[in-house]
DNA sequence: GAAATGTCGTGATTATTTTCACATATAATT
DNA sequence: AATTATATGTGAAAATAATCACGACATTTC
């Protein structure tokens, strides 16, 4: 609950910085400039410097940033010392893909359990994660504060209510439903169909090159 | 290539409006107000009115918007009369999930073909979409302007170069690699690990309720 | 060790987006 | 027909974000 004055736009870029610094560190790189970072992650170098500056003077003039130092800094800022446990609801096409992905590789985020209503899926282990019946959710989910929602549209609202009742604090919602939650619950929507359609729209209406 | 003065933030919301209007229309609803829309899709009502106003006066004071009229308007604005054909590269966990999803349900967007390097996958039909060998991409992809990229990190750059050579105009990139393209190619990144980590960060650092 | 080079951190500016708030027009009600 | 309720469209203000551009200082070179 620290400094609440960091712009949201900056906050959203932090994981990106963190991951790239991790790469550099693994490669044994010792220093990096905002210009280099900029080219790799396609964010303007002034924006990067500004972003970093919200946390104080992390670099050295004429030198750049010390990778290890910066990485350590972000590690603590992003609370990478503690693992965040996440539950996934709806082990279908998308849900299965996520369970098979190792989010812990770059972050200390771990999908700890999954829930589904399909008898076929209950009891399975998918990507190392146990799948429980949705009826058991209320008991089992205790202590977990983040949920990934990948159920069908028709179930989105009901399951959301349950999640809220179970005390969940954040939901990463992949359904196209704009779910309703109390104002102390945070929802981030990832609306894949909208993203695809928006890309198509931009292609047709916002010509690049010589804009 | 019409009016280029619509704010990007607005453009990104258009598909959202379109989909919801479609729902309303299917339900037989005849009129809708910006307030109702706002509650359903969680966008401030003033923002909605402003967004619509970029296209002219689409509503009626004291009444709201005529669903059918508005829908028709967005249909042409979003070019829903013509189908956009898309190719998907990398039929793995994520790729398979997308192939099994019917994007055409709400948009006129269709995944027409997929490519993979895995002999096991080549020749299969996944979600009604044929999977071809990556070697055939250059020939087969002709005429397609949008690609969904779901290959492993290690392949992202090479495949991107190929896509660019093949004349692709837009890429929806799901790999964490910030791919490099000529400036007339548009890339939208969907970085799922970053999204998840950002949500966790916001939960810890941006308390809701009484902000 | 002096000069040249490189890069940060940031004040100031500009751009973009959201929100307020109300005049105005239509619809519904009595 | 008059009155009341409703909801748009938008000028103006506020909030947020990106970018410019440069002084200051560390590093590197000669
Ligand atoms: N697959 C995609 O590419 C894609 C794209 C855009 C949006 N989406 C959205 O993401 C969501 C999931 O998509 P999907 O393709 O994985 O769907 P899916 O049908 O493959 O999976 C849904 C899963 O949820 C389970 N489920 C159903 N009711 C449940 C309940 N009450 N409690 C718990 N689990 C329940 C089902 O058994 C199934 O396993 C949908 O809302 C869809 O609209 C998916
Ligand atoms: N699955 C997730 O939840 C998830 C989450 C975040 C990011 N991502 C990213 O999305 C991408 C895809 O993830 P995934 O889990 O589906 O991986 P995956 O390994 O399951 O699938 C990758 C597919 O690409 C194919 N492929 C490999 N080399 C190829 C080539 N040269 N040409 C064509 N096809 C090739 C493979 O055969 C495989 O089918 C990765 O970059 C991953 O980092 C995935």
Image (cartoon, coloured by chain):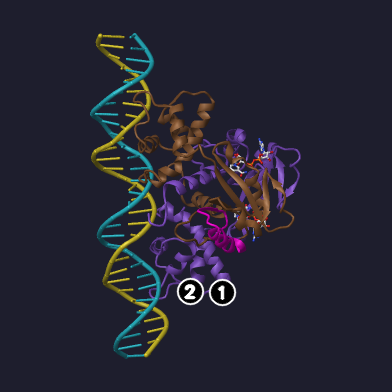
Chain colours: A purple, B brown, C cyan, D yellow
Give the chain letter at badge 1: A
Residue B52 in the image: x percent, y percent? 38, 36
| The stretch drawn in magenta includes residue B157 | yes
In this figure, which residue is indicated by the disc labeled 2?
A: A31
The residue shown at (39%, 67%) is A57
Residue B133 in the image: x percent, y percent? 68, 56
The residue shown at (66%, 48%) is B96
Q: Quadrant of residue A89?
A: top right
Q: Looking at the figure, which quarter contains the C terminus of chain B? A: top left
**B164 to A135, vertically: above or below:** below
User: Is residue B69 visible to the viewer in this orientation of the structure?
Assistant: yes
Q: Which mark is residue B43?
A: none
The residue shown at (61%, 49%) is A86
**Mark 2: few, some, or many residues within 10 Å (few <14, many ≥20)?**
some
Horizontal relation, residue A115 to residue B110: left or right: right
Horizontal relation, residue B71 to residue B193: left or right: left
Residue B2 in the image: x percent, y percent? 38, 43
User: Is residue A2 visible to the viewer in this orientation of the structure?
Assistant: no
**Residue behind label 2 places its C-beta within 8 angstroms of ligand 2:** no
Horizontal relation, residue A106 to residue B51: left or right: right
| The stretch drawn in magenta includes residue B150 | no
- Label 2 residue SS: strand
Viewer-proximal residue among B123 and A17: B123
Residue B82 in the image: x percent, y percent? 52, 39
Distance from disc 2 to disc 1, alpha carbons, whole Å, reads 9 Å
Range of the magenta residues? B153-176
**B90 to A195, vertically: above or below:** below
Q: Which mark is residue A28?
A: 1
């Amino acid at each position: 609950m620290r400094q609440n004055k960091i712009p949201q736009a900056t906050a959203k870029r932090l994981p990106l910085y963190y991951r790239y610094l991790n790469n550099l560190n693994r490669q044994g790189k010792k220093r990096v400039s905002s210009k280099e970072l900029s080219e790799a992650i396609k964010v303007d170098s002034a924006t990067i410097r500004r972003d970093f500056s919200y946390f104080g003077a992390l670099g050295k003039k004429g030198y750049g940033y010390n990778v290890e130092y910066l990485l350590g800094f972000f590690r603590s800022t992003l609370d990478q010392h503690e693992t965040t446990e996440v539950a996934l609801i709806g082990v279908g096409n998308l849900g299965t893909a996520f369970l098979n992905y190792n989010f812990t590789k770059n972050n200390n985020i771990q999908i700890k359990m999954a829930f589904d209503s399909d008898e076929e899926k209950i009891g399975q282990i998918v990507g190392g994660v146990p799948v429980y019946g949705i009826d058991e959710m209320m008991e089992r989910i205790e202590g977990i504060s983040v949920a990934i929602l990948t159920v069908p549209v028709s179930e989105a609202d009901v399951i959301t209510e349950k999640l809220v009742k179970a005390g969940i604090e954040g939901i990463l919602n992949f359904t196209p439903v704009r779910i309703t939650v109390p104002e102390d619950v945070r929802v981030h929507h990832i609306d894949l169909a909208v993203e695809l359609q928006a890309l198509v729209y931009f292609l047709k209406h916002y010509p690049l090159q010589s804009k």
